[in-house]
Image: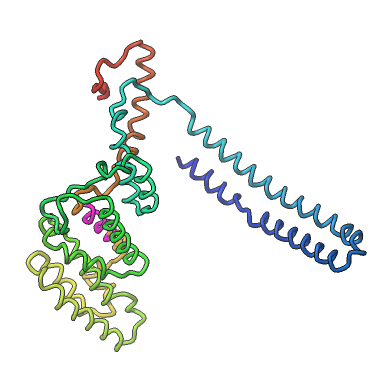
């Protein structure tokens, strides 16, 4: 796989059409200038075309040379793929468990689009699949402890709105470092999260405290640093009260760190304020909890099935070769002779 990655990077480096496009633009401009010149002075058309011949030929030659480099890089990459990913027949069977359950396959595909935030694609897919019939509209069971106030099941339209909200919150978190939407969601579902033993709400509050107190403070003057410390302390007094029973030690560490001020990096509390990877971690945790309250796994079933299938295929392929040599067959539809 490392070999393919290296080849892909080499192809990406050579797959640059900017010079080709520049040569094309230059050629087009020369042709347009020549046309205007001929329109303005028709009697000089032969001279204008004569002068244009060599530049246009050179322009086309440059375009051709640029495309040759791209085609060569593409050919090398294709050969690398063929070398490492040899075409082998996949294990086949006369038994297809889902052959008569198209609605389940369509539901899984449509749900995958929704989970990935591709709402327009999901809408078009549902409209053209068996789910165009409302009787087959995908439904998702809500866990009993969920705080999402809906009926027993969520229609695809509601599910789309839920995932749209999730992606909005994630975008605010990752792009704008704004934790407020995620914090408001966690508060609205505090009871459900606590019932699951989740620490998401506290981790959001902790990250917000660290952001108020620590972010870039080494460049602040004394007065600005005191203002940020006061803002963090006010936030802690307002928000951390409800977490004292479960997270008292962590809260004490956060508050105790204030005594070290600008020298926090050399303090005993520096680990509590290490935010490397914290934003990505909190985003993953938020996604997992959001999906859990909808009764869904954090990863798409399509992704899980494809990954499991890719892992299992080499073994099944080897088994198929052995069975062909021994002229044996599977004896049961539900039999999987792999230990």
> Looking at the picture, how far across and down is residue 308, in whole percent?
31, 36
Towards the viewer: 145 or 230: 145
Towards the viewer: 175 or 319: 175
| Residue 288 lies within the magenta run | yes
* Image point (29%, 29%), residue name: 100
Asked if residue 54 is positioned above or below residue 68 in the image, the reply reads: below
* Image point (36%, 35%), residue name: 310
Residues rendered magenta in the picture: 282-291
Q: Is residue 34 left or right of residue 263?
A: right
Towards the viewer: 297 or 8: 297
Question: For residue 135, which quarter of the picture?
Answer: top left
Asked if residue 244 is positioned above or below residue 120 in the image, the reply reads: below
Q: Is residue 225 left or right of residue 32?
A: left
Q: Is residue 287 left or right of residue 13?
A: left
> Looking at the picture, how far across and down is residue 25, in whole percent?
70, 60
Question: For residue 32, which quarter of the picture?
Answer: bottom right
Asked if residue 306 is positioned above or below residue 205 in the image, the reply reads: above
> Looking at the picture, how far across and down is residue 122, in whole percent?
36, 49
Asked if residue 212 is positioned above or below residue 117 in the image, the reply reads: below
> Looking at the picture, how far across and down is residue 87, in whole percent?
48, 28
Q: Dividing the image into 4 quarters, which one contains the N terminus?
A: top left
């Amino acid at each position: 796989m490392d070999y393919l990655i290296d080849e892909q990077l080499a192809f990406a480096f050579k797959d640059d059409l900017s010079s080709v496009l520049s040569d094309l633009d230059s050629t087009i401009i020369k042709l347009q200038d020549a046309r205007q010149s001929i329109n303005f002075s028709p009697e000089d058309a032969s001279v204008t075309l004569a002068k244009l011949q060599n530049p246009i030929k050179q322009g086309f030659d440059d375009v051709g040379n640029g495309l040759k480099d791209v085609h060569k890089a593409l050919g090398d990459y294709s050969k690398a793929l063929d070398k490492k990913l040899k075409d082998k027949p996949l294990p086949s069977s006369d038994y297809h468990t889902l052959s008569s359950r198209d609605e389940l396959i369509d539901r899984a595909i449509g749900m995958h689009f929704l989970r990935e935030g591709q709402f327009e694609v999901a809408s078009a897919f549902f409209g053209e699949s068996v789910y165009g019939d409302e009787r087959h509209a995908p439904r998702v069971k809500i866990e009993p402890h969920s705080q999402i106030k809906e009926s027993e099941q969520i229609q695809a339209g509601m599910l789309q709105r839920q995932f749209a909200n999730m992606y909005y919150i994630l975008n605010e978190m990752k792009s704008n470092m704004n934790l407020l939407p995620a914090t408001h969601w966690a508060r609205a579902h505090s009871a459900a999260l606590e019932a699951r033993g989740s620490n998401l709400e506290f981790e959001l509050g902790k990250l917000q405290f660290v952001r108020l107190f620590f972010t870039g403070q080494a460049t602040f003057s004394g007065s600005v640093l005191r203002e940020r410390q006061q803002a963090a302390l006010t936030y802690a007094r307002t928000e951390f009260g409800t977490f004292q029973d479960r997270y008292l030690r962590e809260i004490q560490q956060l508050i105790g760190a204030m005594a070290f001020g600008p020298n926090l990096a050399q303090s005993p509390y520096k680990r509590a304020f290490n935010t490397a990877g914290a934003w990505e971690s909190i985003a993953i945790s938020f996604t997992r909890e959001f999906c859990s309250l909808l009764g869904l796994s954090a990863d798409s079933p399509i992704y899980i099935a494809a990954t499991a299938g890719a892992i299992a295929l080499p073994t099944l392929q080897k088994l198929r070769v052995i069975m062909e040599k021994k002229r044996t067959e599977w004896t049961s539809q539900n039999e999987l002779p792999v230990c």
